[in-house]
């Protein structure tokens, strides 16, 4: 399935990202539980002097390499800040991409949901060690699944976005309004993937459940919770969480395009050889997913933002901007990521927070939109990239791949 991926093959000083957002691809690598010490972090890499012209040229060349109509980047370093844009908002269009464009941010939304849960932990309304059955008696094996395991994608709950039923429904009726309970029911009807805490498998079912639990505990709709707890305090005036029936995007915005169909890309986002040839020849064209209803992703991925707001958010997420969490909780969250595979430089995942080398943040994808947001607290560097034809025809996340190349160029080997 093409949608709501964290196309993690791309973001940082690692060989490849292995996170998966709302996709049919799975990762079930055995890992340590979150109560054990995280794997040792490799020595910090050194930031090179800022080469704005070189990085801009690399950004543009990589966006072109991955067949993007348009893309945008924002980079903040101790030496200075700069932004760059590439191309247009739609294939064959004439409207240039703008730094102010709103986009669908996909699984970056999970960092909002996870942050709210951690705030509720601070307030004593919930505990990381609580079994999910305390709040949702309908969860299979819920007495043995903790809130923390759900945040860390180690609950064993199956991913509803990997089902044929959802993918076929999205193809047949892209404007359908999905209720969160429908999504949960789909996930809970599937057999569990593994015993809680024994493996890692990125499952959007976890985050939908956490969103519903947050609503129950805070007594408000999730969009109000996000506005009150996150957007307003941080001044994220261009960021929103839409009503279930709202498939619009604020102006200005980029359009978002995708290849083929959800059903045909359940197993792999890469186009088969014949369609790759047709895509290269311009005889097979991408679909417009700009205004498809994102309610099927809800607390796992239906957020909207801009590149500037994402930069502000990821800096708060990484601890540069204080106040999101108290110091003790922030420190614990930054220590929470554990390896998602046994590769030496594997991406790590914690309390709805990814760690990509020295960068902390997330990636996200919804039909037509792929984005990466990361903050490196060691070098005080912020990088945000988005692209508007996602995934690329070769199955990779274009913004994530652009980010990876930029990071490789910015740091010493």
Image (cartoon, rainbow, N blue to C red):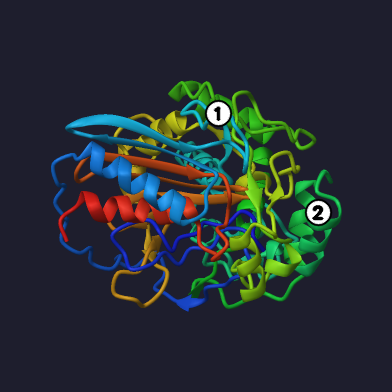
Residue 320 location in percent, x, y? 29, 34
Name which residue lies at 59% across and 24% down: 252
Q: Is residue 400 left or right of residue 274?
A: left
Name which residue lies at 80% across and 46% down: 179
Reading the image, the residue beneath label 1 is: 239
Q: Nearer the viewer, residue 140 or 388?
A: 388
Q: Quadrant of the C terminus?
A: bottom left
Q: Is residue 96 visible?
A: yes
Examine the rendered structure and indicate whether residue 162 appears above or below residue 384: below
Q: Is residue 282 left or right of residue 110?
A: right
Examine the rendered structure and indicate whether residue 81 appears above or below residue 389: above
Q: CA distance from mark 1 to mark 2?
A: 26 Å
Could you say whether the residue bearing mark 2 is in a helix, strand or loop? helix
Q: Is residue 352 visible?
A: no
Q: Earlier in the sequence, mark 1 or mark 2?
A: 2
Name which residue lies at 42% across and 64% down: 17
Task: Determine which quarter of the picture holds residue 136.
Answer: bottom right
Checking the image for residue 317, the label placed there is none
Could you say whether the residue bearing mark 1 is in a helix, strand or loop? loop
Answer few, some or many: residues within 10 Å of disc 2's Cα (few below 14, many 20 plus, some between 14 and 19): few
Residue 290 location in percent, x, y? 69, 40
Checking the image for residue 182, the label placed there is 2
Q: Nearer the viewer, residue 232 or 282?
A: 282
Residue 268 location in percent, x, y? 61, 71
Task: Determine which quarter of the picture holds residue 40.
Answer: bottom left
Examine the rendered structure and indicate whether residue 151 appears above or below residue 219: below
Viewer-side label of 1, 2: 1
Q: Is residue 92 left or right of residue 119?
A: right
Answer few, some or many: residues within 10 Å of disc 1's Cα (few below 14, many 20 plus, some between 14 and 19): many
Q: Quadrant of the N terminus?
A: bottom right
Q: Is residue 198 left or right of residue 316?
A: right
């Amino acid at each position: 399935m093409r949608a709501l991926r964290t196309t993690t093959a791309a973001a940082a000083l690692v060989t490849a990202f292995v996170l998966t957002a709302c996709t049919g691809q799975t990762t079930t690598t055995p890992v340590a539980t979150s109560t054990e010490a995280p794997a040792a972090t490799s020595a910090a890499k050194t930031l090179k002097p800022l080469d704005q012209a070189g990085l801009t040229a690399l950004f543009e060349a990589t966006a072109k390499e991955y067949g993007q109509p348009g893309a945008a980047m924002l980079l903040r370093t101790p030496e200075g800040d700069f932004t760059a844009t590439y191309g247009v908002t739609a294939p064959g269009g004439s409207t240039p991409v703008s730094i102010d464009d709103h986009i669908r941010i996909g699984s970056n939304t999970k960092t909002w949901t996870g942050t709210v849960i951690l705030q509720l932990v601070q307030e004593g309304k919930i505990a990381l060690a609580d079994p999910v059955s305390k709040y949702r008696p309908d969860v299979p094996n819920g007495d043995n699944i903790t809130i923390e395991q759900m945040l860390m994608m180690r609950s064993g709950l199956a991913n509803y976005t990997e089902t044929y039923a959802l993918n076929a429904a999205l193809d047949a009726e892209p404007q359908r309004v999905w209720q969160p309970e429908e999504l949960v029911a789909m996930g809970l009807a599937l057999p569990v993937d593994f015993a809680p805490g024994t493996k890692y498998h990125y499952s959007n079912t976890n985050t939908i459940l956490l969103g519903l639990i947050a609503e129950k505990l805070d007594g408000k709709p999730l969009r109000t919770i996000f506005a009150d707890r996150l957007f307003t305090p941080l001044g994220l005036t261009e960021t929103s969480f839409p009503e279930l029936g709202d498939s619009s995007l604020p102006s200005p915005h980029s359009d978002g395009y995708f290849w083929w169909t959800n059903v045909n890309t359940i197993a792999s986002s890469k186009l088969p050889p014949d369609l790759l040839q047709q895509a290269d020849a311009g005889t097979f064209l991408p679909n417009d997913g700009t205004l498809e209803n994102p309610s099927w992703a809800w607390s796992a991925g239906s957020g909207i933002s801009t590149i500037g707001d994402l930069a502000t958010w990821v800096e708060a997420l990484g601890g540069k901007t204080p106040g999101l969490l108290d110091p003790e909780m922030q420190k614990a969250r930054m220590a929470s990521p554990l390896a998602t595979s046994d590769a030496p430089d594997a991406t790590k995942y914690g309390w709805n927070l990814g760690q990509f080398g020295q960068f902390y943040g997330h990636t996200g994808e919804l039909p037509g939109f792929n984005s990466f947001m990361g903050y490196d607290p060691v070098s005080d560097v912020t990088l945000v990239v988005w692209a508007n034809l996602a995934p690329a025809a070769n199955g990779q996340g274009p913004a994530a791949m652009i980010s990876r190349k930029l990071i490789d160029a910015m740091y010493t080997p």
